[in-house]
Structure formats: C-alpha cells, structure tokens
Image (cartoon, coloured by chain):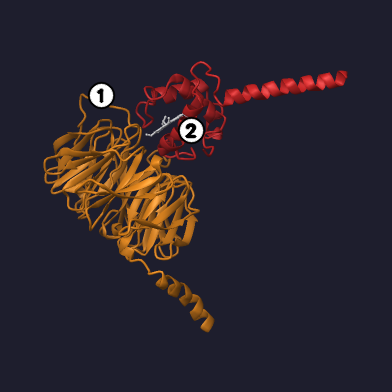
Chain colours: A orange, B red
Amino acid sequence: MLAFVVAVMAPLLLSACVVTPDVNDLGIVIERAKGSVLVVDIKQHKELARVGGLGDLSHASVVYSPDQRYAYVFGRDGGLTKIDMLRQGVVSRVLQAGNSIGGAISKDGRWVAASNYKPGGVRIFESETLKLVADIPATMANGSLSRVVGLVDAPGSRFIFTLFDGDEIWVADIRNPDKPRIRKFHNVGRQPYDALITPDGRYYIAGLFGEDGLALLDLDNLDNGVQRILAGYGKGERKLPVYKMPHLEGWAEAGNYLFVPAVGAHTVLVVDRSNWQEVARIPVHGQPVFVMASPDGRQVWVNFAYPRNDTVQVIDAETRKVVRELVPGKAVLHMAFQSQEKKIWISVRDEDRVDIYDTVSFQRLASIPADKPSGIFFTSRATKIGL
Amino acid sequence: MYTHWVSSWKVYVLKSVVMFSLLLSHGLFAVAGMPDQSRQKELRHLLKHDCGSCHGMSLKGGLGPALTIEALAGKAKSYLLRTILDGRPGTPMPPWKGILSEAEATWLVGVLIEGKGSDER
C-alpha cells in the first residue's frame, strides 16, 4: 500500500516542485520532419519539453480534451497519439490507418474521430483508451472508398465530414457511437477539400477545389440540403496554379463576415453571413492558405502557398484592406492567436523557428527554436466548437 | 614486375572512375543544365517538404499518390516529367514549369525512380 502511494505520489510531488504549469497556458508545436512535438508555455514563450516518436507528422493536427489535460495528435501515417500535457509524455498511441489527414473530438470529450485517406473513411475511438468503437468507410456510389477531409464535431453529438473523391457531406450521429447513424448529402460540388463549422455550431461549410464556390449545410435544417454559395466567384479569370492546398480552419469571422481563401487566385473572399452573398474580394500577396481572424475579430491574418510563403499579411476586418505585411522568413506554415493577449505565434519552417508577434505594434517579441515547425495548437482550442 | 604494372594500372583506372563519378554526383560537372550541388540540395528540400505537402513527407502519399520506387515502377520517365512540368488539369497536381526548369524536373524524376526521394537531407 505504501509502495503504491509512493509510486503514484512521487511524480506528482516531483512535478509540484517544478511548479506544475497551468493547462490553460500550454500548447503544442508540431515538428513535422522529426516526428516530435514541442510542449510550450504560451505565457512564458518557452519550450517545456519535446515529445518524440510520433511518426510522420507532415500535415499533423491536434485536438484537446475538454479539461485541456490531454492532446490527441493525428499524424500523416495514421498514428493517433494521446499526450499528457502536464507530464509531457505519451499516454497511449495507436496506428489507426495507413494515411490520415486530421481529427476531431466530441464536445463531451468521450470520443475521438480520425479522418483518413487510406483506407478512406472515419474511425471513432474511445478517448480514454484509444479503443476503436466505430469504423465508417467512406464508400461512394461506385463502391470504392473516398478520401475524407473537413472532419468536425458538431452540436447534437455529431461528427460531420466530407468526401473529397465522392463530392459528398456526411453527418454522423454518434449518440450510439458504436452504431453511428449517417445521413449523406450527394453532389455537394466538385472536390471539396476542407470544411469548417461556424462557432455557434449552426452551419457547416465545405470549400470546393474542383469548381468555384462553397457548399453550405444548415445543421438545424438538414432537410433543406446543401446549398451552393459564392458559385462561380472566379468567373472569367484564369486560374493560377495552387502549390499548396488552402485550409478552412475555424471561422475567420469578423463581425458578421466570413473571410475565406479563393482557390487559384491571390484573393481573400468576404461573405456576409446574413445572406451568404459575397461582399468583397481582397487582393493579397499570393494563394492564401490560412485565413484566420483574431479573437477580437478586428484583424484577419493570412499566410500563403509556395513559392510566396515567406510573407504574412494582416487585413483590417472593418475596412477590408491589407494594413500590414510581415516577412517572418521562408515557409510560414501556420499561425495561432494567443487568446487573451494580443499576440500571434507564427511557424517558419525553413528557419526552424516559431516567432511571436505583438498584433498591435507588429513587433517580434520572441522566437522559439523548433525543428521544421508546422502546426501550432493551443489548449484554448478545447473550448471552441469545431476545432 | 608485369603484375605490378597491371595492378597499378587497374588501380589508376579505378581511381579515375571513382573520381569521375564523384565529380558527377557532386555536380561539379555542369552537364547540360543539370542542377549543381547546391541546387540539388534545394530540390531535395522542395521534394520532401513542398511536394511533400501533397504527396506526404516520406512520399508515401497524401492528397497526391505515393511517389515511392514501388509506386512509380514501370512508369515512363517522360510521362512523369510531363506530369511535373504541366501538372494534371482537373486534379490538384499543379504545373511546376515556371518554377522548375526542364533539367531540374528531369533530375527530380531520376531521384524519384531511383527511390532516393525520401532520403534524409
């Protein structure tokens, strides 16, 4: 008994001496080439630990448990790793597929879902144990499997995702997680490449690669089906090559407006949420990849695809003009706002650095060395829907 | 005496062959626009990270198919070269001409079909 108490208490005591960090202040930076992640202290701008052995992390993403204690890292090679943010170590890890693109966690934190390219579909795991509870192959009309993108969690115990090859959106009701009930929407538009959900959980929107426009699904009125918005926004213009797929991450919502990357144009599109009409197109430096609104909704930060990926532009949400241009360095891959303070973290892959900027003065405040950093994910994502 | 001469001659030939191939592989010979050593390094980086954003960092596939030695076995060099330079309209594979010269793309095809695409650099 005493031995048990000592064994359990010792690490707690130890970490208590080193001052246990507050989970609210933590985040993860993906080191894509090394197969490791850095656990960082956001407030102190510093690395706390490196956790390795996570496999191929090109295109990795992270979701957090509702209490922000655990991170679930989805790797390219199908690895799903659960990390304890306080002890900064791996709790468990499974290789759940051959090729994976991302994941989501249910609002209650009980279920973690991964969206896979190979085999095309979604797999649902118990978050506690990473035990498989449901396998949802993304079977298309022709019988083959589609690659799955744009997986999000939605209110009403639902996971929603999109079939890149099948041009479909599926809504999976997971109240009985081992027997998900699926509602399918066909012909949503050609090659949907990513999707987002509005912060109120009301709308699911998929961006289309194969044609100009977005597919909109009202989650309160599924019977209305999928609507096309911004159809033909690039009409008459020659498409520019896209050297990196854009992302729809979160909701670049500023006031009542949605800011989204155009595909094949150096443009950010602005949509009015009240009628889903395009209200502006903002010329920018290159093919936008991430278009992210600051927590106060005043600014929209944009990074760009290869070969114009050394630059970040800041759009003033009200005037819809580019008000600032920064050149952090070669291959800016991702950005994350530090919610409470006016700061943004920017990963600069080829410089092996994460830079922290003040979003008011645009001064660089600090840099953290990191090996080929890509995604940056703060625990505050735990409280946001769809992330 | 004779054997001595033969063996030293052999050594000499061997040495020159080694030297020559070293020169070649290190790009000291600028053969018909072939990328030089530092450009080769950049191209490998491009392959791993920027082609890798669609094909996977280890080229085992992503949105784009695997570009491993097994996956490309039996595919014509010219077909791969045209795919890289012209892209595949109607798919996310973009045209790389304008960014890569024909010689550079040819060199990349060589790296890929020899299965050297995901070598650590």
Q: Residue at x 30, y 33 (%)?
A: A210
| Between marks 2 and 1 in the image, the one whose residue lies nearer the viewer | 2
Q: Position of residue A131 (x, y in %)?
A: 46, 61
Relative placement, left or right, of B27 versus A337 is right
Q: Does residue B31 appear anywhere in the picture?
A: yes
* In-image side of A252 versus B19 (left or right): left
Label 2's element?
helix
Q: Is residue A137 visible?
A: no
The foreground one among A62 and B30 is: B30
Which residue is under mark 2? B44
The spot of residue A95 in percent (x, y) is 49, 53
Q: Give the quadrant of residue A347.
A: top left
Dot 1: what SS?
Answer: loop
Residue A85, labelled with which disc?
A: none
Q: Residue A82 lies in what quarter of the image?
A: bottom left
Q: Which mark is residue A238?
A: 1
Q: Tell which residue pokes out farthest to the right in this image.
A: B1
- Disc 2 from disc 1: Cα separation: 30 Å
Look at the picture and state if B10 lies above or below A95. Answer: above
Residue A262 placement, left or right of B37: left
Residue at x 22%, y 51% (from the top left corner): A198
- Between A248 and A344, the one nearer to me in the picture: A344
Amino acid beneath label 1: Arg
Badge 2: few (under 14), some or many (20 or more) residues near its Cα, within 10 Å? many
User: At x 53% / y 81%, what residue is drawn?
Assistant: A3
